Image (cartoon, rainbow, N blue to C red):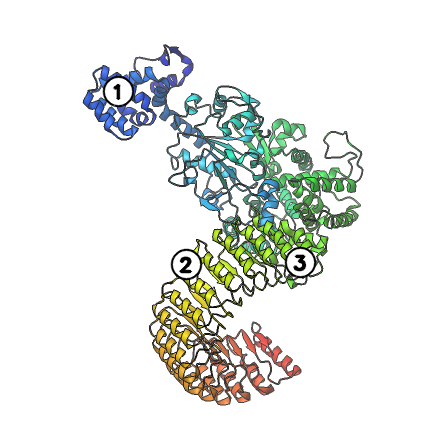
Amino acid sequence: MEKSGHYDSLLDLSNRIPWQEDCYVDLQSKPNSTSTKGQTEGVGWIQKHQGQLERFINATVLENALSHLRKLELLSPGEEAQVHGAGKLQEQIGILTSILVSKDPQGSDALQAFIENFDTQVSRLISMHDPMVQEHKRALQLQYPTPSPTPYPSLSTPDFCFSRVLLLVDGLSDLQQKEHDLMQVEATRGSQRQHVRPLALTKFLEPLTRVSLPPRVSLTVGVAGIGKSSLVSHFVRLWSRGEIYTDVSFVLPIAFWELNALEKVSAERLVKLAFPHITDPSLVLSGACRTLLIFDGLDEFRCPLDFSEAAPCTDPKKEVLVEDLVTNIIRGNLLPEAVVWVTSRPSVASLVPGGLVDRVTEVPGFSPKDIQELLTKTIPKGDTVSQIWAHLESNKIFMVMSYMPGICSILLATLGYLLESGWQEGLPRTCTELYSHFCAMRAEAGEPRGREPVKMEPLNGNNRKLLASLGRLAFYGLLKRKYTFSEQDMRAYGVDLPSTQGSLGIGILIRKESLVCVAYRFNHLTVQEFLAATYYHTSSKRAIFDMFTESAMSWPKIGFQNHFRSALQRSQQAEDGHLDVFVRFLAGLLCPGAVRPLAGLLTPGKDDGGQRVWAAGFLQGLLGSGGAVVSLRSVNVAYCLQELQHTEVLRSVEEDLRFGSLGGKLTRTHCTALAYLLHVSPECSEETSLTACLDYNTVKSLLPQLLYCNHLRLENNHFKDDVMELLGSLLSAKDCHLQKISLAENAIGNKGAKALSRALLVNRTLNTLDLRSNNIGSKGTKFLSEALKMNQFLVFFSLQNNLIEEEGARALADVLLSKCKLVSLNVQKNCIGPDGAKRLAEALKTNQTLTELILCSNQLGDKGTVALAQALTVNHTLLSLHLQSNSISNKGMTALTKALRMNRGLILLNLRENSIGVEGAKDIARALQENSTLQDLDLTANLLHDEGVKAIAGAVKVNRALTSLHLQWNFIKCTATKALAHALLTNSTMKLLDLQENAIGDEGMMALALALKTNTSLCTLCLQGVSAGRTGAISLAEALMVNKTLHTLDLRGNAIGMEGAKALANALKTNRTVRSLNLQENSLGMDGAIFIATALKGNHQLTYINLQGNGIGESGAKVISDAIRTNSPDCVVKI
């Protein structure tokens, strides 16, 4: 007790008076002073405060202390030199204290006396810092206790919530600054921005690089209910337990809802009010120790921050308006040494000038995996979990909304409650139904019980009155953008405070209490919007004045329709969409099923059915009105129609989108419906196909909504250069989410390419650009190439069939020489000759990123091929090289095969449709005996003949890398086939062999069949049109009875007949590996087809069979098709 009392007297600065300059003398000090007590205990003052001395003594204090100690002859010149000889300041202090400790007690007393007289602030920090920090941490641990463990984890469970890291972002997007939180999530489908960097809490206040500075002002944004305040609480808990940022002396979390209770305040008084245990705020705010100020929830602040008009203030003792205090702290006028962390919803965060913010982070929402994990941990019953998950997957709006943990909690709790309590009328399909059930659930139990059935009788009088008053509070709070309410606000709107402690009040309201004030808020923004809509819905039926004017002084408005129209008009006029969700709920409340759970509060009037029909017509009219561009306000009208469950137009457009039949149908109404579907339709989640249905005007109309697509296909739309100007602006936008865009088969010229190139200079999201079959030419290619030299994000680029010629190839070669990140380049069919190939080859010698190069259908010839071969001797990053149809002869092949002996990277080589003969085949055979990387070799349609293929077969015996060999159309006969079959007896890597359109006959097929009995690697065998008949088919059938690896067999265009079919049918009864069998055009006849169909009754694995062109007839085809589908419902049948 004595020690505690002494400590209290030390902290009580009111008991001190100034003496001389900055020295303080304690008038109530007792004989057992700190230093004396330390000495009596055998611990000197220096030893007791060693850490504080090294932390708080600055260079000025040190130099004056050395001079003072030298005068007292407690420090020799040699010892002083020893101190100066140390490196850093802390090391110098360490040496000095070591010297003085050896001279205790005189050395310790002298240093203490000097510091107390020379710099009182340093003296106070040394003596008071650690006790104050420990007391502060104890207080915060009481204020932010660790959530109690529960049987079922919830959103507040720390190990679940904060396993996710913050995202480091490059400022706020336009969507974040201008739109409602829910619309932000819906427009982007809850996807994160591209190229964001994860940032762990342990790195949150640290420099990003070795040369950068730590941030002074950090801004963390996140939509309502994302977990910003929970993150702050988690951070404070970790710090108070000493787990993070031990170099930070004080963390001062202050919520903006607390500041709402203050008018004028100084920085020091604010600290004293929020943290009364801090007895000397001036020390905390002095800058001598590292202090973190956390301002949580800027969106809940009643005063808008005005950085242009706020009066400057630099004195922490001066009282100013609370909004000016915050502004000056963020600006750095006040407390410039303190670190500041502000959290906010994005739209309000944009009020803080970007130039004042050093770091912007974003709290990510839930991924589908997070949602599923929370669901399985929260709901104890497995069947309930599967039902809820199936419901979410079938209702994409709910799945997207669950990105926000606050809404996810409401959704899972409500659905779980309904399922476990035996609700029989189907799960909610609209948000209005969901929130009606949520409020009813809270009114009945406060928390989902899962034992008793949902009670459908009207709510009792107390709850009805409470919901009505809370609805009024919610509505007028929404109009004023007010989301936290004082007790005075609650009483002003007729809320009975004691009644809020019942199950309903506890279920939908959160009471927040601090040392500064008490405040209330709804447990999510959408709950406030829903209750506001219920109030407006019921009150508008009897209101005679405009309800958006709180005073009665307004033009008369009589009747629900006038009030509904007024609400929609105000919603459409609100640029930031803050009334969007409110009007959705207002429309949804016109559906009887949505209001049934709250029947006691929202008794439907006689005209509600007619009102619903009228509202549907009114909303559909709005859907087709508006300007030339479909805005998010227009899209919100479609959301209103969804809530109203009037979805005929939406379903019609979705069906056209699914079947690709939107062409000529995109009126203004349909464009708006399409924009809505871009948010919610499964058809648009991975890829949005708008092929052959758009023109300049529709693109201009849809442009703002196309921003948030990930993969956009705009093929065959006859686009010209003017549309590229529009799409260029789309790709240049900061909000652009596009990762893939296909503009194939349009009419884009060099001017359009120039517009796209300007966009590529700034775009940071696009990784795939397909411009095949346009009119870009060499000039347009130059424009694009200049942009690609600077662009670091595009990796797949196709200019197929654009007549870029040699000049364009040279421009692209320069791109490959730059620091671009291109991985795949397609310049097929572009009239590129040997010179262009040589330039590309030179670039490949140094390029280290390109893995695929497609040069098919050009004019490379042997000269161009030789140049590329030389590049392959040094380039080992290129994996796929396509040289189909390039007039390559044996000479070019010889150069390529020499390169293959040295190359260690190439996996695929496509040499289809060239003029490679026997000698070229022999060369490739020799290369295959040495090469250990090539896996896929395509020599289709060359001039290999038996002699060349026999050489290749010899290489296949020893090669252990090749997995696919394509030899179609090569004049191969049975001799070469036998050689290949013999190679397969020992080869264990070949998975695909293509011998289509070669006259191998029955003899060749029999040789292959013999090999299949032994081979254990071949999976695909293509024998289309190989002149095989009954004998070959029978041999092959016998092989299938023992082979256990082949899963694809193509026998099209042969003549196996009925007997061959019968043999294959018998084989299928025992074979368990063949999945795809093509017997098209094989003269099977009805009998042969019946054999095959009968065989499928057994335990086979077929998933595809083709029996077309076998003279079965329509009636026979139907009988056989039905029989196969009956026996094998999963098998695809072509007949």
> Left or right: 417 with respect to 895?
right
Tell me the SS state at disc 3: loop
Task: Tell me the distance, in whole angstroms, between the alpha carbons under discs 1 and 2.
Answer: 63 Å
The amino acid type of the residue labelled 3 equals: Leu
Local packing at callout 3 (Cα closer than 10 Å; few below 14, some 14-19, many 20+) is many
State the quadrant of the N terminus.
Answer: top left
Q: Nearer the viewer, mark 1 or mark 3?
A: 3
Residue at which label 1 appears: 66
Q: Nearer the viewer, mark 1 or mark 2?
A: 2
Residue at which label 2 appears: 847
Q: Residue at point 72% right, 50% down?
A: 623
Q: Residue at point 51% right, 19% down?
A: 318
The amino acid type of the residue labelled 2 equals: Asn
Tell me the SS state at disc 2: loop
Q: Is residue 984 visible?
A: no
Q: Earlier in the sequence, mark 1 or mark 2?
A: 1
- Work out whether residue 770 or residue 287 is closer to the camera in this orientation and state it: 770
Residue at which label 3 appears: 694
Do the residues bearing badges 1 and 3 touch, measured as CB atoms within 8 Å? no
- Work out whether residue 858 or residue 197 is closer to the camera in this orientation and state it: 858
Q: Earlier in the sequence, mark 3 or mark 2?
A: 3
Task: Tell me the distance, in whole angstroms, between the alpha carbons under discs 1 and 3.
Answer: 82 Å
Local packing at callout 1 (Cα closer than 10 Å; few below 14, some 14-19, many 20+) is many
Q: Is residue 289 visible?
A: yes
Q: Horizontal and vertical percent for residue 1038? A: 45, 85
Q: Nearer the viewer, mark 3 or mark 2?
A: 2
